[in-house]
Image (cartoon, helix red, strand yellow):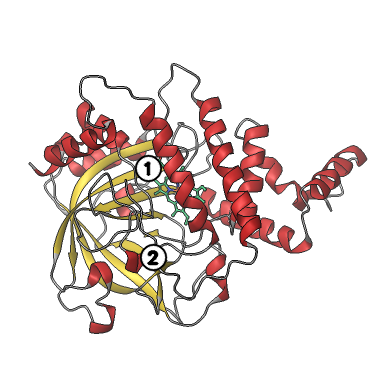
């Protein structure tokens, strides 16, 4: 893997880079500690988050032939150009578990697209290939605004066996039902973590986003809209967020009466056994103002001011019955997506995206290095990638 350093374009506002670097380094360390705790030897190590896959499918990513000239940037430079791609659908939850909790709460859902061999200059190559990854969740905002908040969450996950509840404890301070000892503990936590009133406001924002996620019932991973949530460059003078929306509703895509533990995989598989291709619009919101909220991944870009514009189409051909084959699932599991597999024109920006770079690298390296394969001296990951491309595209 080689890495290119693109010039800093405007838009990023790093308040205290030394502090941020420390927060990022600690989060990387803690992410690896979490993997060790979740997957004690000889368990197979899975992704740091999004370990549960509903399935991988092959697709085509085609730039709209009528794309406006001012949007012909980076990947979108050539109207009508068609790329091979593949897509992994997942649950964001850090641990494998049922798609819906025992108490009926829903989780965040992920869609990761790998657009293959895009040409051009990429920030980090994908084991030799120039691929453009687009990672999305089914909410327009990310629940954690910046590196400071994400580190606070990660410390709590390490301490409390993956239970995030204590992250929200500062919100309880005014709760009249609290006894003095509980108040004292929360106060001590606030002081130890140096949590300001501004931080508490962000914790409240996170709480509201999590509530929305828990209330979002998804019947089929192919039937919902996904969002980048975080911002990306669009050339050097503009920024974008992106989103993917199904063009037409899938028939029989109602929420099941008694959802099974893996009902999302079942729904995806059932749809991929039919003969009807699934089509999504790939859309971007673009802005060129010097928006301060670039550094806050929980900030929503008002669609009235910055409407989503369709720039490409994603077609998932069907049937793809191989989705259920063990060999296919194994290949799918070995892949690594990161927003930093990107053309320089679409560099990830903002605090959360800067954090994602080393965290995804650490997660992918850790889980793939745990897979020795003495039969061949090519790096394990590259062979997997090659085999999977061959498997999908012949
Ligand atoms: C806008 C915010 C984010 C979005 C939209 C997002 C989305 C995703 C998606 C869809 C995947 C699954 C990729 C796959 O299918 O393999 C993923 C994986 C992952 N994400 Fe995020 N994520 C976000 C923020 C973060 C943050 C802040 C962290 C931690 C610092 C993080 C850590 C990870 C890790 C460790 C993986 C697994 C990487 C691997 O082992 O290959 N994500 N993310």
Quadrant of the drawing holding the C terminus = top left
Question: Which residue is most to the right?
Answer: 180
* Some atom of ligand 1 lies within 8 Å of the CB belonging to the residue at label 1: yes
Q: Is residue 216 visible?
A: no
Which of discs 1 and 2 lies nearer the camera? The answer is: 2
| Vertical comparison of 322 with 147: above or below | above
Task: Name the one closer to the observer, 216 or 340.
Answer: 340
Residue 211 placed where, x, y %? 58, 52
Quadrant of the drawing holding the N terminus = top left
Q: Dividing the picture into quarters, in which one does residue 360 lie?
A: top left
Residue 305 placed where, x, y %? 46, 82
| Vertical comparison of 215 with 308: above or below | above
Q: Residue at coordinates 59% horizontally, 66% vertically from top-left?
A: 14
Q: Is residue 188 visible?
A: yes
Report the side of 185 relative to 127 (left or right): right
Q: Secondary structure at mark 1?
A: strand
C-alpha gap between disc 1 and disc 2:
30 Å
Q: Residue at coordinates 20% horizontally, 24% vertically from top-left?
A: 376
Label of residue 369 in the image: none
Residue bearing mark 2 = 6
| Vertical comparison of 349 with 335: above or below | below
Task: Name the one closer to the observer, 148 or 13.
Answer: 13
Residue bearing mark 1 = 90
Report the side of 170 relative to 202 (left or right): right
């Amino acid at each position: 893997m080689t890495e290119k350093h693109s010039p800093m374009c405007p838009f990023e506002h790093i308040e205290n880079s030394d502090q941020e670097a420390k927060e990022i380094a600690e989060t990387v360390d803690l992410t690896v500690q979490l993997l060790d705790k979740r997957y004690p030897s000889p368990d197979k190590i899975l992704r740091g988050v999004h370990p549960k896959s509903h399935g991988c499918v092959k697709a085509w990513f085609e730039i709209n032939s009528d794309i406006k000239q001012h949007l012909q940037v980076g990947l979108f430079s050539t109207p009508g150009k068609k790329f091979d791609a593949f897509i992994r659908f997942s649950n964001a939850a850090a641990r494998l578990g049922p798609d819906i909790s025992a108490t009926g709460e829903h989780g965040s859902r992920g869609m990761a697209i790998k657009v293959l061999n895009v040409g051009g200059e990429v920030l980090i190559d994908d084991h030799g290939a120039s691929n453009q990854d687009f990672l999305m969740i089914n909410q327009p905002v990310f629940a954690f605004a910046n590196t400071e908040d994400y580190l606070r969450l990660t410390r709590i996950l390490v301490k409390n066996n993956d239970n995030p509840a204590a992250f929200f404890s500062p919100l309880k301070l005014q709760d009249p039902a609290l006894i003095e000892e509980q108040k004292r503990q929360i106060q001590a936590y606030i002081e130890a973590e140096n949590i300001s009133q501004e931080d508490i406001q962000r914790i409240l924002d996170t709480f509201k986003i999590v509530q929305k996620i828990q209330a979002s019932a998804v019947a089929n991973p192919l039937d919902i809209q996904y969002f980048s949530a975080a911002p990306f460059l669009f050339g050097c003078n503009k920024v974008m967020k992106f989103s993917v929306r199904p063009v037409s509703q899938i028939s029989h895509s109602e929420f099941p009466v008694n959802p099974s533990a893996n009902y999302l995989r079942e729904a995806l598989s059932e749809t991929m056994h039919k003969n009807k291709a699934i089509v999504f619009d790939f859309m971007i919101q673009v802005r060129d103002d010097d928006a301060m909220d670039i550094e806050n991944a929980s900030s929503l870009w008002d669609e009235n001011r910055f409407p989503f514009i369709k720039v490409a189409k994603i077609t998932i051909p069907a049937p793809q019955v191989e989705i259920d084959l063990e060999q296919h699932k194994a290949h799918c599991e070995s892949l690594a997506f990161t927003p930093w597999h990107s053309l320089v024109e679409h560099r990830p920006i903002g605090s959360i995206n800067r954090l994602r770079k080393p965290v995804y690298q650490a997660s992918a390296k850790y889980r793939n290095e745990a897979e020795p394969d003495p039969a061949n001296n090519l790096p394990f990951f590259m062979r997997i990638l090659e085999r999977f491309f061959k498997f999908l595209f012949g």
